[in-house]
Image: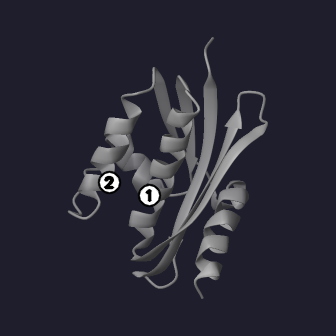
Amino acid sequence: MNKKIIIFSDGGARGNPGPAGIGAVLYDQEKNKIAEVSKYLGETTNNQAEYRALIEGLKKAKELKAQEVECFLDSELVVKQLKREYKVKNQELAPLFLEVYNLSQTFKDIKFVHIPREKNKEADRLANLAMDKKF
């Protein structure tokens, strides 16, 4: 059986850096919601939060024994870095990039897709929920 999971992830910080949260929503290939993650990170940057949201989504997909993963993010920077279109110049993002890379090796196939923010509302809601809990 080829188990495909679709991940929508989002991270944000209020202020940059500032109090940050992440959200990720996982769907099966029939578009049924199968898991979600909402977590407060403490003080960090928007880009670090974007990476951490994806990492948590990938960890959950691994737990669920996904073989293929399609990741949808509204962070153009993160997607372009993961597709090797941009270099990772920020030394605080480099270990997060490496963690995503290492997690991606556990799947037969992985895709990273940039989407407009308005198509990522559920993950954004979960990230904001996490930030709201700490205010």
Residue drawn at x 25%, y 65% as measured from the top left: 92
Q: Earlier in the sequence, mark 2 or mark 1?
A: 1
Count of numbered circles in the view: 2
Who is closer to the viewer here, 106 or 74? Answer: 106
Who is closer to the viewer here, 8 or 129? Answer: 129
Which residue lies most toward the bottom here? Answer: 135
Mark 2 and 1 residues: CB-CB less than 8 Å, in contact?
Answer: yes
Who is closer to the viewer here, 15 or 115? Answer: 15
Residue drawn at x 21%, y 59% as measured from the top left: 89
Q: State the image coordinates of residue 63 (x, y, percent, origin top left).
A: 53, 35
The picture quadrant where one finds residue 1 is top right
The amino acid on which the numbered mark 2 sits, given as a three-letter code, is Leu
Q: Distance between the residues labelled 2 and 1?
A: 7 Å
Residue annotated with mark 2: 96
Residue drawn at x 61%, y 67% as measured from the top left: 127
Near mark 2 (Cα within 10 A), the count class, few <14, some 14-19 or many ≥20, is some
Q: Along the horizontal axis of the image, is 43 left or right of 28?
A: left
The picture quadrant where one finds residue 28 is top right
Q: Is 1 located above or below residue 41 in the figure?
A: above
Q: Is 114 located above or below residue 109 in the figure?
A: below
Q: State the image coordinates of residue 115 (x, y, percent, origin top left).
A: 60, 50
Q: Which quadrant is home to the C terminus?
A: bottom right
Look at the numbered disc 2 and give the secondary structure of its residue. Answer: helix
The amino acid on which the numbered mark 1 sits, given as a three-letter code, is Arg
Residue annotated with mark 1: 52
Residue drawn at x 61%, y 72% as measured from the top left: 130
Look at the numbered disc 1 and give the secondary structure of its residue. Answer: helix
